[in-house]
Image: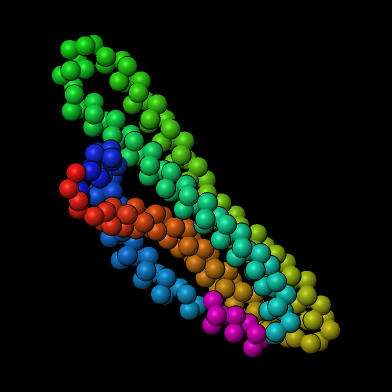
């Protein structure tokens, strides 16, 4: 890193990028990528099986899937923006803490302990609220999947019951379809959760890439 770049950056931000972001990238690349490869093939296979059982029921049960994907996409975008903000607030808090610890003797000499404590408290509170907003976005993923699950099962029960009464489908097919739909919902839930976690990984990758892309120039 160039001296000019280091002068422009806070020490807390550099510490956060070097320590926390690298840790998130190492953890995410080993765990999330493996889950992604394992989970991405399940929904197409299950949907193909459901089409084999009854294409009408399949189309009816997944008719809300496009809207579900759009909502999750927007939620993921907000998650990434919130991740950047949370990382910035954490870096600011670490910078204040580093300044306080590095100048502890001066602070005590001038009797500004209360002022510095208040400054750190404000940064900590800001980081807490930003982190809570990020956690709320993460928590919204599960209710969205539950709504998709509810609409899908209600559609299958309503239309499947009509087909069963009309003799167009057997009871065994309805039960097999419900079982397959349950597997599909579980797979989509796993993918949506993985999508939200990947947004956090992308934030760390972007921050660390920006750090490494700075040229080593002389001031």
Q: Nearer the viewer, residue 88 or 180?
A: 88
Give the quadrant of the C terminus: top left
Left or right, 60 with reference to 119: right
Q: Which quarter of the picture shows residue 31? A: bottom left
Does residue 138 appear in this view? no
Left or right, 12 with reference to 38: left
Q: Residue at x 24, y 29 (%)?
A: 99
How does the figure colour the protein chain or chains? Answer: rainbow
On screen, residue 69 above or below 16: below
Q: Residue at x 79, y 87 (%)?
A: 168
| Majority SS type along the magenta span | helix
Q: Position of residue 201 (x, y in %)?
A: 38, 58
Q: Position of residue 2 (x, y in %)?
A: 20, 48
How many labels were placed on the picture? 0
On screen, residue 28 above or below 133: below
Left or right, 198 with reference to 137: left
Kindly give the residue lying farthest to the right in the view shown.
166
Kindly give the residue lying farthest to the left in the view shown.
105
Q: Residue at x 20, y 27 (%)?
A: 101
Q: Nearer the viewer, residue 36 or 210?
A: 210
Does residue 25 appear in this view? yes
Q: Which quarter of the picture shows residue 197? A: bottom left
Residue stretch in magenta? 43-53
Q: Which quarter of the picture shows residue 180? A: bottom right
Q: Nearer the viewer, residue 114 or 165?
A: 114
Left or right, 129 with reference to 120: right
Q: Position of residue 33 (x, y in %)?
A: 37, 69
Q: Position of residue 4 (x, y in %)?
A: 23, 43
Q: Residue at x 28, y 41 (%)?
A: 9
* Residue 175 falls inside the magenta stretch: no
Q: Nearer the viewer, residue 119 or 191?
A: 119
């Amino acid at each position: 890193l160039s001296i000019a770049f280091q002068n422009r950056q806070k020490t807390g931000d550099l510490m956060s990028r070097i320590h926390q972001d690298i840790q998130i990238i190492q953890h995410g690349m080993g765990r999330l990528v493996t889950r992604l490869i394992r989970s991405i093939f399940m929904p197409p296979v299950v949907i193909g099986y459901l089409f084999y059982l009854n294409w009408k029921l399949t189309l009816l049960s997944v008719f809300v899937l496009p809207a579900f994907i759009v909502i999750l996409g927007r939620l993921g975008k907000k998650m990434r923006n919130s991740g950047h903000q949370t990382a910035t607030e954490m870096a600011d808090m670490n910078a204040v803490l580093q300044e306080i610890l590095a100048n502890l003797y001066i602070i005590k000499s001038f009797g500004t302990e209360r002022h510095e404590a208040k400054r750190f408290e404000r940064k900590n509170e800001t980081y807490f609220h930003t982190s809570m907003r990020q956690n709320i976005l993460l928590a919204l993923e599960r209710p969205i999947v539950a709504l998709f699950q509810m609409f899908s099962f209600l559609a299958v029960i309503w239309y499947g019951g009509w087909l069963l009464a009309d003799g167009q489908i057997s009871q065994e097919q309805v039960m097999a379809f419900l079982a397959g739909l349950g597997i599909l919902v579980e797979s989509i839930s796993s993918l949506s959760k993985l999508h939200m976690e990947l947004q956090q990984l992308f934030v760390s990758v972007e921050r660390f890439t920006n750090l490494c892309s700075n040229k080593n120039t002389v001031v």
